[in-house]
Image: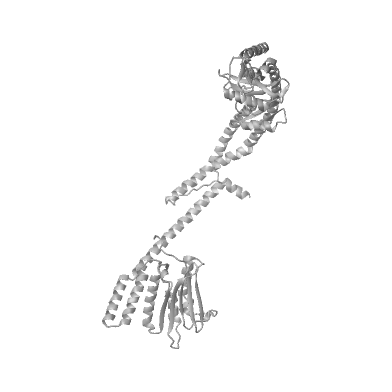
Amino acid sequence: MITKIASKIRAINIKKRLILAFLLTSSVPLLVISIIFFQIHSKSMRDKIATSTSQLLALVNTNMVTEIEKYQYLCGSVCINENLIDSLKSDDLSAGEKNRTILNVQDTVKSMIIYAAHTKNVTVLDRSGSIFYDLGFDGLYKEDIHRIIADIEEKAPVDSWVYARTYGGRDTIVLSRRIYSGYNTKEVVGYTLVFMDEKLFSKRILSAFDAYASANTFILNDDGIVLSSLDQTIALGEPFKNEELFANLQANSNSTNGSFEISIDGVHTLVTYFYNKNINKYFISTIPFSYINSEATAIIGKIILTFAVVVLLSTCIIILIYFSITLPIRKMTALCLKISIGEMNERIQDNKNDELAYLSTSIDNMLTQIQQLIEKEHEDEQQKRQLELQMLQYQINPHFLFNTLNTLRFVAQMNKDTVVSDGITALGELLRNTLVDKNEFISIEEEIKNLKNYFSIQEIRYIGNFNVSYDLDDSLMQCLIPKLILQPLAENSVTHGQRNDGTILEIIVRCYKGDNCITMEIEDNGKGFDTNACTQVPKGLAGIGTPNVRDRIRLSFGAEYDLYITSEINKGTLCRITLPMITHRKGEN
């Protein structure tokens, strides 16, 4: 185990190892303590800020309820105005009656508005959504009116609170409710809309959170729509940009207040909320943890500065130790560079008593041995060169040999000795294919041609003692096999297969497709032998030729392909070889 760890450490250079050892033994504990301190301080500050923020949100809720009661009272006063209800119920109201009703409603509205600066408009709609009365300060687009009516119907009998932007570009929160036909709550005759300036909430009610730097406070309805925000960059009237926030609020819907942590725009943030069930509104405060952890961050900064000073001093000490280790190593490296360019006479000669001195001495001794081996190898190369020159001197010139054979064949033809002439021709072809053709693999057609030339030469010696027949698959003739793979097997049949009773030896050469391979056979009806008795195996089958064939097949194609020999006394011998089907030479298309 220790050896494996040490081996992995060796992948790092020595300077980095020393620095890493220092960091692991001294700096890392300091860093761990700093992290633990930071986490404890952060949790403590989080809990304190969450508690104080929750109390502030409760205060904001109280101020909100107090403030909006005035506007709810105004909205309710309009909704129960009997003249207005009668006028909205009437389908054939005259212009004079409508004007009297409008004046009556206007008197009610003016008498109820205490904070005129925050009431931007009051509008009464009939049951079809058309404007029956409008205070005239500002107005809404038709699609906004339809949206508000839809929200009123959805939230009824609870008041509807909807953000809307007026003609004049003012941000308003519209408080709306149904107008019923007297005490009949099933019959809706119209709607009352009270427009409140959004700044009533953002500048007055939510301003209690201005003391928190980087904090934001806003109001959401129960659909997650932003009604008001202390941060002017947040879009009003739209879902809050972080869906995870509203999802957490819904998950904690059973609790009226609480806090949780999420990431908003990539910033880790503490979210504290207060839910008012009466008006179905969320009061939410978001404070980034960068503000919560600012004090701890300042302390950590001082710790890091101290840590940097310690690291700097320690690094200086480590560098001194590093040079005491690397200077001997550099000498070894310089020696290796000289060795790489052939300078073998230099030595390190380090006489110190540490491990590096021992290594230097070992390198010096090894270099001496290498120098001796190189000198010996040089002597061996010289001897090898001399032997090659001698071998070249003893080689027979093939052209001289072929010219001589052609001369002998010409003389045999002049003397009308066809047997000798044909034998010399066959020998010349056979030698040409073996000496001149350097290809290791030849086609089956060429191998059969070489085999026929061999049989022609043997007929000079064994004239009339054997016959050869061929059973060949013509579609395989261009497939490639090792050169002269059949000749040793044919030689065994001719030389060792003949009987002594005058029977003519019959030799059959076959070539056919096997199972995903090529099968080639040479079979004779000769005297055969007992394959189980080693003493009866013919010399050719147990000598060089047949093992050479088997070794060539296995070396070229693997153990999947082989030579198989079956024989029976007085019945003959069958030699079968299996080879892969190769259709082109290496390097050819």
Q: Is residue 108 visible?
A: yes
Left or right of 506 in this view: 225: right
Give the number of marks.
0
Front-most of residues 267 and 316: 267
Task: Judge whether 569 appears above or below 103 on screen.
Answer: below
Percent from the top left, x then y, of residue 12?
55, 44
Which quarter of the rendering shows the C terminus?
Answer: bottom left
Task: Judge whether 439 appears above or below 106 on screen.
Answer: below
At x 50%, y 66%, the residue is 558
Front-most of residues 393 and 118: 118
| Residue 71 in which image quadrant | top right
| Residue 154 in which image quadrant | top right
Q: Is residue 211 visible?
A: no
Colour scheme employed for the rendering of this structure: one colour
Q: Residue furthest bottom?
A: 501
Percent from the top left, x then y, of residue 588?
39, 60
Percent from the top left, x then y, of residue 366?
50, 54
Left or right of 573 in this view: 87: right
Q: Residue furthest left?
A: 414
Front-most of residues 21 and 588: 588
At x 41%, y 76%, the residue is 470
Left or right of 550 in this view: 63: right
Front-most of residues 418 and 17: 418
Percent from the top left, x then y, of residue 291?
63, 26
Q: Residue furthest front?
A: 92
